[in-house]
Image (spheres, grey):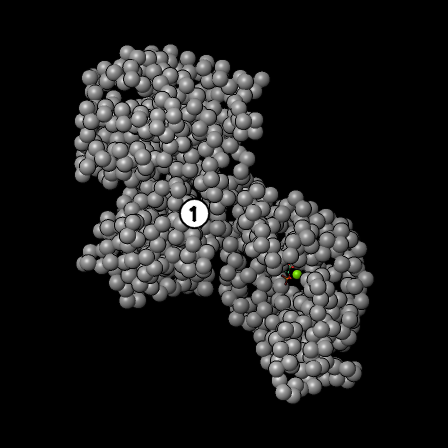
Amino acid sequence: MAKYVYDFTEGNRNLKDLLGGKGANLAEMTNLGLPVPPGFTITTEACRHYLAEGAVHDGLDREVAEHLKALEERMGRKLGQADDPLLVSVRSGAKFSMPGMMETVLNIGLNDESVHGLAKQAGGNERFAWDSYRRLIQMFGKTVLGIDGDLFEDALDAVKGRRQDTDLDAGELQRLVETYKGIVREQTGKDFPTDPREQMRLAINAVFDSWNAPRAILYRRQERIPADLGTAVNVMAMVFGNYGDDSGTGVAFTRDPGTGRQGIYGDYLQNAQGEDVVAGIRNTIPLEELERLDKTSYDELVRIMEVLETHYKDLCDIEFTIERGKLWMLQTRVGKRTAAAAFCIATQLVDQGLITLDEAVTRVTGDQLAKLMFPRFDHGAEKKRIAKGMNASPGAAVGKAVFSSERAVELAGQGEDVILVRRETNPDDLAGMIAARGILTSRGGKTSHAAVVARGMGKTCVCGAEELEVSTAERRFTAPGGIVVAEGEVISIDGTTGEVFLGEVPVVASAVVEYFEGAEPADELVKAVDRIMRHADASRRLGVRANADTPEDAARARRFGAQGIGLCRTEHMFLGERRQLVEDLVLASTDEQRQAALDALEPLQKSDFVGIFQAMEGAPVTIRLIDPPLHEFLPDITELSVRIATSENPTDKDRALLAAVKRLDEQNPMLGLRGVRLGLVIPGLFAMQVRAIAQAAKEVPGARPEIMIPLVATVQELESVREEAVRILAEVGVEALVGTMIETPRAALTAGQIAEAAEFFSFGTNDLTQMTWGFSRDDVEAAFFSRYLELGIFGVSPFETLDREGVGRLVELAVQEGRATRPDLHLGICGEHGGDPDSVHFCHEAGLDYVSCSPFRIPVARLEAGRAALSETDSDTR
Ligand code: PEP
Ligand code: MG
């Protein structure tokens, strides 16, 4: 029989799929003997059942009741018992952390009777008991009953005035409880539920439901977390950080999540419960100050942090509560970190002997490396600094200040760069945070919602810039010196230093890019990148080539570590002034005219290839013969028609051009006269290109050309162009491989035959995806992919990450059948997927020889190829 509930003593860290990250790690800490309040976890399977059936599984209530009974026996009190109540928290906890996205309810078990029992338990501390009760109604009202949280906040503000919440006395809090109960009655037409078990049951269901809350769906899509995992629910005996000044709650990291440096990092809030820290309600104090307030708890915390680091062999983040001088661990996990910290931590852990260099490579990702390659602010530029906050998530962001999530989305939708400015963010700001270039808040620490979410997304964030007075209502903020920044004014924020500047600060290349360009590694980060890249290179089986078609791109690709060019598209070489020659080619009515146009193009093509061969210094260069439909090089049909219609005496050439353009016009150009078909239909076109390649190769010592035929669907097409190519190569006296792209489904399906005529295959997965899905690659992403993503038809565009189930099967089939025909067939990929991390792993698994991608993606592909070779499973740093 399925088991839906696990006591914390029953689980472990490897059960994240079943117990969620929080549940699995609570169990792990329990097993390590750390002070975790007792409790149990309801599995993600139970959640999936609930979401599918709209009701909990029959056995769940019974299992929960049994575990609750065991908990009650252990604690020596019953849930909500009037004279001496056990209280519990109910918290969500999915496999992947989704900070602030889902629900938590604390203090379950309180009602008009047990509130007195709680006060008694607390040695007559009435204030504490009523504070806990008002928190329950507030959290339960918002989360479980769906009441607008502002109603409770406003009621609290009305009592508080200019005071802090900790200044309220028992009487005031008791009256607030009555007000809150009134809000519940008014908003739901029912009384606040006083039965503790009913409270718990409703809270559990609310956590299940929160999996499908709009903000959770949005977050998952952004972070590419699968939609069907469900969340676990943790029920835990309450410990209280709101007893008084000898109590409190905090968040800690075993290392700085911004830089990776080891030490004591975190925030602490005296006399408070967990949600106060993340919500930024009151300003926290730095964790170091806890040493002064409560040395025993502080020392114990530092000891536990060491235990966790050594045990998890990684940065851990921690939530804890101190209840009257006793430390309790409420959560830990391998913590999120910035991209820079990920590299530094990985190499630090190697130096500490905790992990191997192999493991270090698997601990960082290509996406993190890509983030490090973003530009940063120019240190030398003039800038007007108006504030300094906390460096919550690095990067340089410039944009117009906006003060609401809606406005951020609206302006970003119009193509504007915006910075979302808020006093503090909450989960409802998620859409605006995604739309913004950067996030700036005036309150909250490095563990505030804004900071955690921004770091997770790799978005620049400065938080807690307290010098700023943010007025959302007036859509402006003021900075010291009477500076007022209204909506729409440009600001620049530096997430690496925490600085805020007025106006636009110029940005420059990142130090990591400079390193890839050849600079010596200078700082800790670049040294870490260097070490990891070297090891990835030494470990990978896949070669990495570049898609480049100018000598400049080729040279950059070489500096970035490309081992060759996997795709040199020749079509751009027919643009600019050379269009004229293409027009002559199209208009040629005799063989002589056509040959004259080709003869004029040949030396130009040759010089193009000479430049590229030189830049590649003897590395292989795969040159693809011309691919796009010819009308792409001719004037637009409408423009030409208008020109002729409005001209007093249109030229004969224009008229002839219009006729040609009309003749070449196609309903489906991507499926029309292009690729190998052009070579077969226009005599001499491919021959001219092959001759130019051969002659260029002859001129550049060591040049290694490979000639690639696009859009082949049958071996017959390839055979006839290959024959001609081989003949020309022999005439010029140059050796070159001749191969084909595999970018039509038919080519993949008949790869065994095609390999008879091809020395290499390069998978053109852009076209292959287009034709396999029947998706126009130029239209569908803008037209309806957002809807498809929303519907969960796929989690990511198949043009971005290779669709393993469909397109991937065609690739695998072609690899297998191609190699069966020709065992030494060389295999690569040159579609956009060649630089996408997940697709690189696929290429490794499918047995390709290399991936080819744009020059800037080369370091990412090198790293991911190394990771693919070193690990089948990804590390858990999401
Ligand atoms: C492809 O189709 O994947 C490819 C690389 O060719 P292009 O993008 O030029 O059509
Ligand atoms: Mg293509």
Quarter of the rendering containing residue 755: bottom right
Classify residue 796 as left or right of residue 328. Answer: right
Is residue 169 or residue 872 the one in the foreground?
169
Tell me if residue 251 can be seen: no
Q: Residue drawn 20% across and 20% down?
A: 125
Residue 763 at x, y = what percent? 67, 56
Classify residue 588 as left or right of residue 400. Answer: right
Tell me if residue 117 can be seen: yes
Report which residue position mark 1 lands on: 431
**Disc 1 beta carbon < 8 A from ligand 1?**
no
Quarter of the rendering containing residue 710: bottom right
Is residue 426 or residue 528 the one in the foreground?
426
| Vertical arrangement, residue 226 with respect to residue 743, above or below | above
Residue 118 at x, y = what percent? 27, 17
Is residue 512 or residue 367 the one in the foreground?
367
Q: Residue drawn 23% across and 18% down?
A: 119
> In terms of image quarters, where does ligand 1 lie?
bottom right
Q: Residue drawn 48% across and 48% down?
A: 365
Classify residue 226 as left or right of residue 813. Answer: left
Near mark 1 (Cα within 10 A), the count class, few <14, some 14-19 or many ≥20, is some
| Vertical arrangement, residue 297 with respect to residue 688, above or below | above
Q: Type of residue at label 1?
A: Ala
